[in-house]
Image (spheres, grey):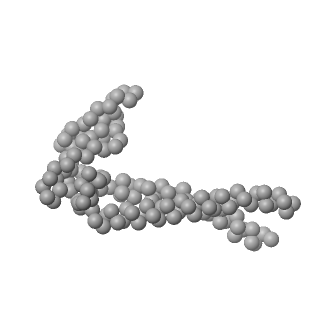
Amino acid sequence: MNGNKSKIMWQYYIILGAGVILFVAALLSLKNTLFFLKKAEKATATVTSLRVFESDGEVFSPLFTFRTRNNIEYTYELSEGTNPSAWYVGETETVIYDPADPSSVTLYTYFRIFAWPLILVSIALPLLVIGGGYFIANQFLK
C-alpha cells in the first residue's frame, strides 16, 4: 500500500511544481507590464485603413496611425483580424507606447495590457490548489 502511495505522489509534485513555475512567470509578467505602464505614454490613434488578408475568406486588420509627443507619426497594425471588420476607417482608440521605442505600442484596454499575467495566473492557481491540496490533505489523513 505504501509503495502505491509513493507512485501517486510524484504526480502531485509535478502539478505543484508546474503551478509554482507558472505563478512565478505570472508575477514576472505582471512586473514587466507594470514597468511598461509606468514609462508608457498615451496617444489617440486613428484607423487609417483596413488591411485585407485571405484566410478561408477575407479577414480585416486595422492600421492605426498616432502621433507621439514629439509630433512624429507612427503606424501600428493590430496583430489580429476579424470578419466582419470590428473597426472602421476614421475610428479612434487610445494606445500606449514606449517613448524610447514608439514601435512598442498596444491598445489601451484592460485585457490587452494584462493578458499574459491573467492567463498565467488562471492556469497556475488551479495547479497550486490541486498540487498543494494533496499535501495538505495528506497531513490530515495520516
Residue at image location 58% in from the left, 60% down from the top = 19
Which residue occupies the extreme right position in the image? Answer: 1
Image position of 50 (left or right of 134): left
Residue at image location 67% in from the left, 65% down from the top = 133
- Looking at this view, is 140 or 78 the one in front? 78
In which quadrant of the rendered image does the C terminus lie? bottom right
Query: In this rendering, is residue 105 above or below 34?
Result: above
Is residue 117 visible in the rendered image? The answer is: yes
Query: In this rendering, is residue 89 above or below 17?
Result: above
* Quarter assignment of residue 141: bottom right
Image position of 73 (left or right of 142): left
> x and y percent of residue 9 in the render?
74, 60
> x and y percent of residue 93 in the render?
24, 51
Residue at image location 35% in from the left, 41% down from the top = 80
- Looking at this view, is 101 or 15 the one in front? 101
- Looking at this view, is 141 or 113 the one in front? 113
